Image (cartoon, rainbow, N blue to C red):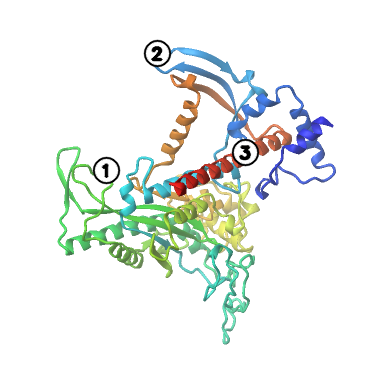
Amino acid sequence: MRPRLVVLRLPSLPPPQEETAIFTAYRPGLAAGRDAQVLHRAASPGFSGWLEHTRPAGGCVRPVRLTGTIAAVDRNTGRVLSEQHTDELPDRTLYKACGNRRESACPDCAWVYQGDAYQVVCRGLTGGKGVPASVGRHPVVFATFTAPSFGPVHHRHVPRHTCRTRQRCDCRPAPCHARSNAGACPHGQPIACFARHDADDPRLGQPLCLDCNDHAHQVVWNHFSGELWRRTKQAAERHVGATCRRRGIPKVGIVTASGKVRWVPPVRVSHGKVAEMQRRAAVHFHVLLRLDGVDPDDPDALVPPPAGITVDDLEDAIHAAARQITVTTPPHPDQPQGWLIAWGEQVDVRRINSTDGELTDSKVAAYLAKYATKATEATGHTSTRLTPATVDNYADPGGDHIARLIDACWHLGRPTHTDVTGGAATADDRQASLDTKPNVYAGLRRWAHMLGYGGHFLTKARRYSVTFGQLRETRATYRCNEDDDSADTITIGTLTYIGSGWLTEGDAFLANTAARQRRESRRIGREELAHEAWLVGAAA
């Protein structure tokens, strides 16, 4: 009975839904094997050492297992102080967290990534971690760029909000597509919908008629949306520069590496951008845009813009760029004139830290960091990269909305020599290898599991803020400095990948539960420290 008591004390917190593959329900015959594994591991003499050994990857769903040699080297002399092979470690392997940013793939690693994403975004708004605090006084706006319509879809629109927070909105929505004189589309489907959709209605984002929706244009838009954003930011910077010229603000001379003087506008736009996949499977961008000045003596310095340029000018530049900039894609056998890539009509630009207090630095940073850990989950599709052997499991020209989008990716990304001029691609066409000739549409097959979008879900300008690499390096340095003995040593590993995942479900249960307990303890500790600091400040 003693081992049973130990096991019952471990899971102090309920497991998240994302880990159902690891934390199986208690049903006869299913959990019995895991229970035996947990009892065997917890009763072993080296259980405490094993738990400490797995701590770096404790909360990971599928940690990477490595084998090889780990050496401690003197930082000053380069002499090898000690050497250890992974065969001497518990399980004869070294565990490393997978580092996956997607919450649906690994909640614990996504939690770490989300914290880093918050720091990347927030430091560009308030300063810190090497970014000067003066950036908090720069003009900054929060803009949302949406995709155009590729066909009518079911949507939820609330004309007047009376709720306290949009995250828990329970306001009565308007009818979806209320049209009293609406008829049917050319395919015989009604083009009206009088339903008042709930927030969790599975019909949201689905086309009213699948045959009317332009799936080819939608995946091409997803694929080229990054180029559209690049040109839009350039146009916004040019617009602000033109505003400076009209107001008599001179250009700034910067000395290049060759010794020549290059004259540039006195302002530049730095951004932090997050891509979000909507329910209709079209990407839209949430962007923080900040106006910076240019210091001729130190071009890399973050200085305020000239006094004559305000946040109103930044807003005007964004709206002007969104209206004017379009991209015409290269010719394709199915579309010889290419596709037109442009923004949708809904371009929302809002100010940060305004008097209403609705958008603050911390709220925006948390909002963007949340979406940085998501991908296509909103659409219901979560597959990994597709191959000719697996694409037929997801692509179907006559299937649902997502199946048709994947089929459009695979069909449009086919080799250019494939003679398919129209209609749906056959199985042989979809499984043809990629063309060796340059083909700008070939990436649609590589990113078919992302419905055509191949960009990173969090990007930023070089001067906007800190980088993920800097944050990870700081965290690694902190962990090394926790041990005074390792201050003058560095660890060098010669390791080889041998597999992924825990050895047993029981090991996963124990390691993940211990990681959640440590995280909860840290959270409580931070809250206590913050409360004590508040008490000290109130007493003063």
Query: How far is mark 3 from mark 2, CA to CA?
Result: 37 Å
Query: Where is mark 1, residue-wise?
Result: 300
> Which amino acid type corresponds to the residue marked 2 in the rendered image?
Thr
Query: Which of the two residues, 180 or 403, is positioned nearer the viewer here?
Result: 180
Label 2 near label 3: C-beta < 8 Å? Answer: no
Q: What residue lies at 18% left-to-right and 42% top-to-bottom?
A: 297
Residue 35 found in image quarter: top right
Query: Where is mark 3, residue-wise?
Result: 59
Q: Position of residue 149 (x, y in %)?
A: 48, 69
Residue 105: which disc? Answer: none
> Which amino acid type corresponds to the residue marked 1 in the rendered image?
Asp
- Earlier residue among tags 3 and 2: 3
Q: Position of residue 11 (x, y in %)?
A: 71, 40
Q: Where 70 sits versus 540, above or below? A: above
Query: Where is mark 2, residue-wise?
Result: 77
Label 1 near label 2: C-beta < 8 Å? Answer: no
Q: What residue lies at 33% left-to-right and 64% top-to-bottom?
A: 315
> Is residue 98 left or right of 228 when viewed as pictured?
right
- Earlier residue among tags 2 and 1: 2
